[in-house]
């Protein structure tokens, strides 16, 4: 029991080191550290911390342009978050899936993912569980709303231009 607690702390520290490297915009170093953190979490039971580690790794792959790796880890995180029944973690997975869809030029898919993210955000209880890490994946819910509105506006402009060009 005591050994598992130590492993958890080591994994959490590795995750926080990852986040610090990411904040310093040292993305490739952060990605290497995220892989180490995830390796440490692999030996622990699935918890919000393990799902956070997977989301962070996916986000870093996305930031360095490794979209297929990001896709893999986002699907993994989404499945774990669904099993764990965590609306907050699901909202984060959908938000990142929206960013991935945008990066791949799939505007309709991105809009759909952002809408799913908002739906999940609305299910998040006011108080977080003491088990969860208080690591924000977005500054606040408005980030998702802004992304969704921006995409919807650009899509409306594109459709409007197509209609005008046909007339």
Image (cartoon, rainbow, N blue to C red):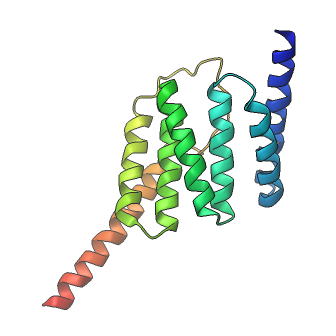
Extreme residue toward the left, this view: 167
**Is 38 on the left-hand or right-hand side of 70?**
right
Position in image of residue 11 (x %, y %): 81, 31
Q: Quadrant of residue 50?
A: top right
User: Which residue is more in the foreground, 153 or 73?
Assistant: 73
Front one among 155 and 51: 51
Position above or below: 35 against 79: below
Residue at position x 37%, y 57% in the image: 111
Picture residue at 45% right of the left edge, 70% below the top: 105
Q: Is residue 2 visible?
A: yes
Vertical order, 77 against 2 (above or below): below
Residue 13, given in percent of the width and then of the height, sits at: 84, 33
Quadrant containing the C terminus is bottom left
Residue lying furthest front:
43
- Find residue 108 and report its horizontal and vertical position in percent: 34, 62
Q: Residue at x 78, y 38 (%)?
A: 39
Q: Is residue 50 left or right of residue 67?
A: right
Q: Residue 5: x, y in percent?
A: 82, 16
Q: How many marks?
A: 0
Q: Residue furthest top?
A: 1
User: At 82% from the left edge and 42% from the top edge, which residue is drawn?
Assistant: 36
Query: On the image, which quarter does residue 119 sit in?
Result: top left
Quadrant occupied by the N terminus: top right
Q: Is residue 23 above or below residue 137?
A: below
Q: Is residue 15 visible?
A: no
Name the one closer to the observer, 79 or 59.
79
């Amino acid at each position: 029991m005591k050994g598992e607690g130590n492993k958890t702390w080591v994994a959490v520290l590795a995750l926080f080191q990852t986040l610090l490297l990411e904040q310093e915009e040292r993305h490739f170093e952060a990605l290497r550290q995220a892989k180490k953190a995830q390796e440490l979490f692999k030996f622990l039971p699935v918890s919000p911390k393990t799902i956070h580690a997977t989301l962070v790794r996916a986000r870093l792959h996305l930031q360095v342009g490794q979209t297929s790796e990001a896709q893999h880890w986002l699907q993994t995180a989404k499945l774990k978050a669904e099993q764990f029944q965590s609306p907050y973690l699901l909202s984060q997975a959908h938000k990142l899936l929206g960013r991935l869809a945008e990066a791949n030029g799939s505007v309709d898919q991105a809009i759909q993912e952002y809408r799913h993210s908002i739906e999940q955000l609305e299910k998040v209880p006011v108080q977080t569980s003491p088990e969860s890490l208080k690591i924000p994946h977005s500054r606040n819910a408005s980030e998702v709303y802004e992304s969704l509105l921006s995409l919807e506006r650009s899509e409306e402009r594109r459709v409007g231009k197509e209609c005008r060009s046909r007339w």
